[in-house]
Amino acid sequence: MDGNILDPDGARERLAAWKGHIEQLAADTQTMSSRLQEVRVTATDPGGLVEVTIDSTGALVDLTLSGRMESTKPDVVSRTIMETLAAAKNQLADRSQEIIADTVGTESPAARAIAESVGNHLRSEPARDAAATPESDAEEGFEDRSFLERG
């Protein structure tokens, strides 16, 4: 095959190769989609107060609170839930991008755009509460810091 467009045999070979490439890309994309839909991520805060499980879209599908919740201020519990959920979404974004790279690769602009879109959709920074907690609450036996603030 010399690349001459007037060469019918060469043109057939190029079309067959192109068709094979498109069929492989379609199969890889289907595999990627199936694997992405199956992903679930479970994350636990370092203090063991909260465990969250999210599905492939980042939706919360399970939430478990430990018995420590009873001795923890409600705002700390809610902040810890949100921080743990954000951490799970970041893990999901990482896992999803690994699946995309494994199945369709990262060479094509389309594959890079898919990976970037998934990352942008799922990734988040943990919620931060900058307000100081009054000392009187600490005296009541409540833990007044989120797991990220504990040393």
Image (cartoon, helix red, strand yellow):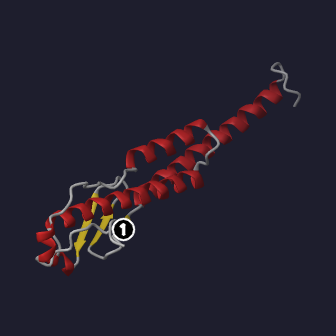
Return the residue nearer the eye: 135 or 69.
135
Instruction: Name the quadrant containing residue 51.
Output: bottom left
Query: Neighbour class for label 1 at 10 Å: few (<14), some, many (≥20)?
Result: many
Residue 116: image x %, image y %?
49, 43
Residue 50: image x %, image y %?
27, 71
Instruction: Name the quadrant containing residue 134.
Output: bottom left
- Image quadrant holding the N terminus, namely top right
Tell me the residue at 12%/70% (across/down). Answer: 137
Q: How many marks?
A: 1
- Image quadrant holding the C terminus, namely bottom left
SS at circle 1: strand
Please tell me whether residue 52 is drawn above or below residue 141 in the rendered image: above
Please tell me whether residue 116 is drawn above or below residue 143 in the rendered image: above
Tell me the residue at 78%/27% (across/down). Answer: 11
Residue 29: image x %, image y %?
53, 47
From this viewpoint, which residue is outermost toward the front? 135
Please tell me whether residue 124 is drawn above or below residue 76 in the rendered image: above
Tell me the residue at 30%/67% (across/down). Answer: 52
Return the residue nearer the eye: 109 or 133.
133
Q: Which amino acid type corresponds to the residue marked 1 in the rendered image?
A: Thr
Tell me the residue at 52%/39% (across/down). Answer: 113
Q: Which residue is mark 1?
A: 42
Compared across the picture, whether 57 is left or right of 78 comes to right
